[in-house]
Image (spheres, rainbow, N blue to C red):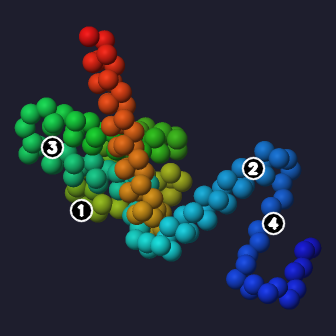
């Protein structure tokens, strides 16, 4: 047992980690760091989105609607972006032992018919896809950063491809 008395800074927190080996300790440290970062993000901006891939499915459907109104080659890029968002719920369902495409199709249909954008992948097989009931949430700031960074990476890759094409001539 570790006891610290008469601490001048009462707002200080110490987390002690014990583990069987160094690899386990490092993994626990990474997990704690991730959890603390999520907490920090929620303190800075307390807005949330529902998890389980529900926000990605909802965004994908909204982007596909926008793509229908656009003509020309840009429509294909917008459609590809919408399809890329579906990788998250497909991966979640496959990692949970379900069929990715079937689960995505079912969730899309449910979101449209029930008009509930918070229906996502039930990874624990609890019997409901309602992320509200399951309390599966993510910070909006994290989700926004993920999509922004992924989009920037794609832009960089496309720029590299253009440079290589120009250099070949």
Q: Quadrant of residue 14?
A: bottom right
Q: Earlier in the sequence, mark 2 or mark 1?
A: 2
- The residues bearing labels 3 and 4 have C-alpha atoms spaced at a distance of 51 Å
Q: Residue at x 78, y 45 (%)?
A: 23
Looking at the image, can residue 120 be seen? no
Question: Of callouts 2 and 4, which one flags the residue occurring earlier in the amino acid sequence?
Answer: 4
State the residue lying farthest toward the top: 169
Residue named by callout 1: 115
Residue 67's mark? 3
Which of labels 2 and 3 is toward the front?
A: 2
Q: Mark 2 = which residue?
A: 26
SS category of the residue bearing label 1: loop
Element assignment for label 4: loop
Secondary structure found at label 3 = helix
Do the CB atoms of the residues marked 3 and 1 lie less than 8 Å apart?
Answer: no
Nearer-N-terminus badge (3/1):
3
At x 29%, y 63%, the residue is 116
Above or below, comparing residue 95 to residue 148 in the picture: above
Q: CA distance from mark 2 to mark 3?
A: 45 Å
Q: Is 73 on the left-hand or right-hand side of 63?
A: left
- Dot 2 surroundings within 10 Å: few (below 14), some, or many (20 or more)? few
Q: CA distance from mark 3 to mark 1?
A: 21 Å
**Residue neighbourhood size for the residue with mark 1, other residues' Cα within 10 Å, grouped as few (<14), some (14–19), many (≥20):** few
The one nearer the camera, 47 or 112, is 47
Mark 1 or mark 4: which comes first in sequence? 4
For residue 16, the mark is 4
């Amino acid at each position: 047992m570790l006891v610290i008395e008469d601490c001048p800074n009462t707002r200080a927190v110490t987390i002690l980690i014990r583990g069987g080996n160094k690899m386990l300790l490092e993994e626990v440290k990474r997990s704690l760091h991730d959890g603390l970062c999520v907490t920090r993000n929620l303190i800075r901006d307390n807005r949330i989105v529902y998890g389980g891939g529900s926000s990605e499915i909802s965004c994908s459907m909204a982007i596909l609607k926008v793509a229908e109104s656009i003509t020309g080659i840009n429509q294909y890029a917008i459609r590809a972006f919408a399809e890329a968002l579906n990788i998250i719920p497909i991966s979640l369902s496959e990692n949970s032992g379900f069929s990715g495409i079937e689960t995505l199709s079912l969730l899309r249909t449910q979101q449209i018919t029930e008009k509930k954008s918070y229906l996502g992948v039930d990874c624990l097989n609890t019997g409901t896809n309602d992320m509200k009931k399951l309390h599966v949430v993510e910070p909006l700031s994290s989700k926004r950063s993920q999509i922004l960074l992924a989009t920037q990476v794609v832009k960089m890759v496309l720029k590299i491809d253009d440079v290589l094409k120009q250099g070949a001539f």
